[in-house]
Image (spheres, rainbow, N blue to C red):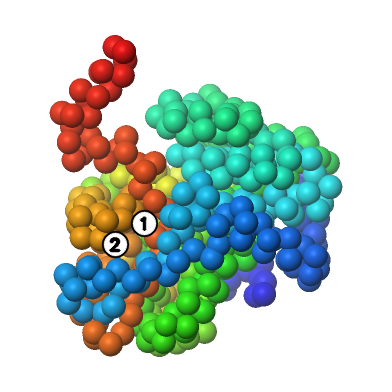
Amino acid sequence: MRYSKTYGEFGGSYVPELLQPALDELESAFLDAMKDKSFTDELEYLQKTFIGRPTPLYYAENLTKALGGAKIYFKCEGLAHTGAHKINNAIGQCLLAKRMGKTKVVAETGAGQHGVATASAAAKLGLGCDIYMGAIDVKRQHPNVLTMQMFGANVVSVESGNRGLADAVDEALNYWVKSLKDTHYLLGSAVGPAPFPAIVREFQSVIGKEANKQAKDANLDVAAVIAAVGGGSNAMGIFSGFLDEETVKLIGVEGGGTGDNVGEHAKRLAPNSGAVTGIHHGFKSKFLLDKDGNIEPTHSISAGLDYPGVGPELAYLQQTGRLTMTSARDSEVTDALAFIAKNEGILFALESSHALAELLKVAPTIDKNKAVIVNMSGRGDKDIFITAPIFNKKEWVEFLQNEINS
Ligand SMILES: *Cc1c(COP(=O)(O)O)cnc(C)c1O
């Protein structure tokens, strides 16, 4: 295991004094757990039986033929229980929380995907679960709220500030400070104060370990690995398995939204992002900030990619030249999603479709004997409320009206 609290100038822990002891406790519990075979054995058992690992490394034969370049492979995290990679981290941290003697987890969620994964993992492991969600997101993402409640979670609608993800983080942290004794804060991406980025990376590294082994077993000459980047957990998960193989190009894809103006995109590391180095939510990284240092609004068609900051390790890897960062516009993303669905019969999540948009650009430029791996961080079923109105608004509206009338 590779463990670090800082990544070059990025990372670290910038939190109120009251919280630091809880982070120190978490760090030592995590380092201790990872050395304990009974912990790692139980984690492996849950990964296999509950999450459904290993997920396949799938050869997209039709797509490879259609694009005429590198052999295309999908690492299918969308087949994991709850439909995305987020469960890898949620199960890992719930197990760690239990080991620390905690009886409850608290988490923030934006679109609700991390909330759903956390609620599921907490139900499985018998932990109490509070999910903090901005009131606007509670409204917009209500199907996820209902799913979390089915898992027994208590969803707290946050009415403060802009009633969005940042406010949910603040309120969840406020609750945590008051209940450190019995509650673990289950952070959902490779962001936040140390040791969270390292913990999330470790629990997601199973993606990269599996993909590397699966690629070796299939004798693949991997030229590139592509992943969508929100906070960076699925990307660090798969990249970590290939970091040491210098010939493998690592490509991260951010939400390019609809344009380069403030509020139109969610690029932090990609060209023309306008992001600056700053400290927010307890860590140092690249953030979208206005001239007063306040967080700027973002937009992406995928709710999972609109965080205004990015994981510190990714910021560092880009700075050192190991990682290439790019972005995909909303329209490129839906085009790529539709193209792959038709050609391959697989529906990607909107987040993961950002990686597909990049794939469509790079695969034809790479030699036929080489392979490109795309991390399918999630499946697209959850996005039907966004994609259906784009692809067939009339029938979608008719369906909703019928549902209401019936
Ligand atoms: C949340 C989410 C992401 C973005 O989060 P990362 O931490 O950057 O991985 C990407 N894909 C899916 C399917 C998600 O649910």
Q: Is residue 163 left or right of residue 206?
A: left
In the rendered structure, are the residues bearing label 2 and label 1 in contact, judged by CB atoms less than 8 Å apart? Answer: yes
> Which image quadrant: the C terminus?
top left
- Relative height, residue 299 to residue 375 (above, below): above
Asked whether mark 2 and ligand 1 are closer than 8 Å, the reply comes as no
Q: Which label belongs to residue 356? A: 2
Nearest the viewer among 191 and 17 is 191
Q: Residue at x 39, y 41 (%)?
A: 382
Q: Is residue 4 visible?
A: yes
Q: Is residue 269 visible?
A: no
Tell me the kind of residue under disc 2. Answer: Leu
What is the x, y in percent for residue 346?
31, 56
User: Could you tell me how far apart the alpha carbons at marks 2 and 1 are, in whole angstroms?
Assistant: 7 Å
Q: Is residue 311 left or right of residue 193?
A: left
What is the x, y in percent for residue 56?
45, 66
- Relative height, residue 337 to residue 390 (above, below): below
Q: Residue at x 28, y 87 (%)?
A: 369
- Relative height, residue 233 to residue 176 (above, below): below
What is the x, y in percent for residue 333?
25, 54
Residue 51 falls in image quadrant? bottom right
Nearest the viewer among 400 and 263 is 400
> Which image quadrant: the N terminus?
bottom right
Tell me the kind of residue under disc 1. Answer: Ser
What is the x, y in percent for residue 351?
37, 52
Q: Which label belongs to residue 352? A: 1
Asked whether mark 1 and ligand 1 are closer than 8 Å, the reply comes as yes
Q: Residues within 10 Å of mark 1 (few under 14, many from 20)?
A: many
**Numbered marks: total:** 2
Residue farthest along the top direction in this orientation: 405
Q: Residue at x 32, y 35 (%)?
A: 385
Dot 2: element: helix
Q: Is residue 130 left or right of residue 59?
A: right
